[in-house]
Image (cartoon, grey):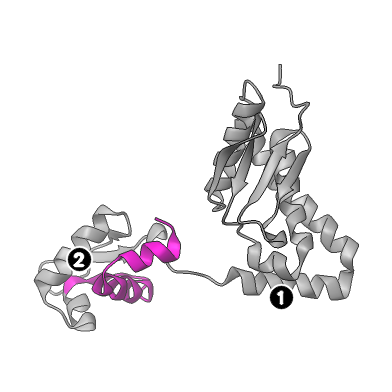
């Protein structure tokens, strides 16, 4: 499950419970959650059990109560990631500011450098590939981990990476230069030029990328 869709797949009460916990840095007890949500102890405990099992909530430090300490529950980093963040709006504002104050070439260079830097982190994994097809598969895995919903597809006797959830699609529609990040990332990750053979910006249902035909596995 991925962020927004994962959050929506939770029940309404579980979503409210997580929203309540995200506003409480110290965590909350079952009693406090009952009061905040207006549900019974049993209901809160059932929802907490489900959220604990999924890794969205953990037990925190017990809260003093004047008697036996009461268990406290805290939202995890994984639980926080369920909540969508409007990165695209912020990124668009930053890109537009750079265009206005630094110019087109500076923006293009920055995007290429960012892609190349992140691509180097993935290069060690792809360097283990025995051939071009395996490198393509490993590249697809790296892109999928970044949220691109990438997979390997056959294409005229070779394989390509198909990505149908470009993480920059909305931003790239306004600023096509953003695509330089993708190509720089993939080229750095594979150590070879990467060709884009299909693009969502041009009306295709997905973006596709092909490794250099002269790709050779490292010796």
Residue 50 place in picture, x, y as percent = 22, 59
Q: Is residue 50 visible?
A: yes
Residue at (32% x, 76% y) in the render: 20
Q: Which residue is mark 1?
A: 93
The residues bearing labels 1 and 2 have C-alpha atoms spaced at a distance of: 39 Å
The span picked out in magenta is 1-30
Residue at (81% x, 70% y) in the render: 98
Depth order, front residue of 12/72? 12
Earlier along the polypeptide chain: callout 1 or callout 2? 2
Is 94 a magenta residue?
A: no
Is 20 a magenta residue?
A: yes
Q: Is residue 116 left or right of residue 51?
A: right
Secondary element under disc 1, as helix, strand or loop, is: helix
Secondary element under disc 2, as helix, strand or loop, is: helix
Residue at (21% x, 63% y) in the render: 48
Depth order, front residue of 20/15? 15
Residue 87 place in picture, x, y as percent = 60, 69
Q: Which residue is mark 2?
A: 47
Contact check, label 1 and label 2, Cβ < 8 Å: no
On the image, which quarter does residue 121 sit in?
Answer: top right
On the image, which quarter does residue 37 sit in?
Answer: bottom left
């Amino acid at each position: 499950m991925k962020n927004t869709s994962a959050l929506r797949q939770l029940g309404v009460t579980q979503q409210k419970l997580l929203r309540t916990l995200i506003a409480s840095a110290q965590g909350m007890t079952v009693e406090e959650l009952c009061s905040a949500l207006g549900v019974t102890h049993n209901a809160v405990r059932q929802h907490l059990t489900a959220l604990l099992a999924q890794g969205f909530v953990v037990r925190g430090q017990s809260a003093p109560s004047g008697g036996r300490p009461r268990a406290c529950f805290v939202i995890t980093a994984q639980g926080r990631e369920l909540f969508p963040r409007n990165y695209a709006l912020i990124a668009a504002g930053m890109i537009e500011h750079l265009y206005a104050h630094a110019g087109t070439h500076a923006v293009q260079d920055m995007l290429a450098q960012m892609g190349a830097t992140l691509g180097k982190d993935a290069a060690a994994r792809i360097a283990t590939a025995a051939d071009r097809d395996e490198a393509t598969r490993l590249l697809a895995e790296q892109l999928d981990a970044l949220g691109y919903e990438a997979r390997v597809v056959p294409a005229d006797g070779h394989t390509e990476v198909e990505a149908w959830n470009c993480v920059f699609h909305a931003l790239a529609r306004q600023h096509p230069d953003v695509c330089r990040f993708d190509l720089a990332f993939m080229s750095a990750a594979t150590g070879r030029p990467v060709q884009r053979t299909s693009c969502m910006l041009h009306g295709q249902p997905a973006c596709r990328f092909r490794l250099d035909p002269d790709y050779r596995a490292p010796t």
